[in-house]
Image (cartoon, rainbow, N blue to C red):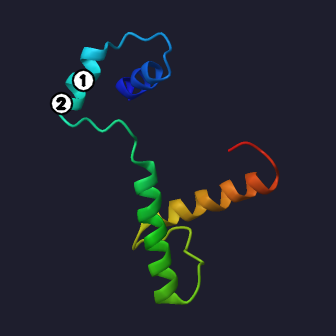
Amino acid sequence: SHQRYHYKLMMESKPTDMTVEQAEALDDIDFVWGTGLSDIWQKRYDEFKAFKARTGHCDVPENFEANKALSRWVRIQRYQYKLMMENKPS
């Protein structure tokens, strides 16, 4: 979000429009500064492990109707791995 971006700039002592007071006001209402991506990654990983335990393999179908988010996550993980193996940025 726009707020997260400006908060990051502020934490890095870079110029930003966000004031300390604004950051504190957001803190006061328990604003989540992180994106939660690591939580989402862990959730999909746990789903992937459960899929393997249930099926005995890691070949999640491309259009897995029972869990489309898992299908998309596996596809992205494979793509990211390919980039890593080719020493390309991801």
Residue on which the image places disc 1:
24
Q: Amino acid at mark 1?
A: Glu
Q: Position of residue 2 (x, y in %)?
A: 38, 23
Q: Decide: is 7 above or below 34.
A: above
Camera-side residue of 11 and 5: 11
The quadrant of the image that shows the N terminus is: top left
Which numbered circle lies on residue 28?
Answer: 2
- Could you tell whether 23 is left or right of 50 in the image? left
Camera-side residue of 40 and 55: 40
Q: Amino acid at mark 2?
A: Asp
- Could you tell whether 48 is left or right of 1 in the image? right
Q: Position of residue 58 (x, y in %)?
A: 59, 79
Which residue is located at x 73 percent, y 42 percent?
89
- Could you tell whether 57 is left or right of 69 in the image? right
Camera-side residue of 32 and 54: 32
Q: Are marks 1 and 2 in contact (CB under 8 Å)?
A: yes
Which residue is located at x 20 percent, y 23 percent?
25
- Could you tell whether 58 is left or right of 6 in the image? right
Which numbered circle lies on residue 1?
Answer: none
Element type where label 2 sits in the image: helix
The quadrant of the image that shows the C terminus is: top right
Element type where label 1 sits in the image: helix
Q: Position of residue 88 (x, y in %)?
A: 78, 45
Which residue is located at x 35 percent, y 24 percent?
3
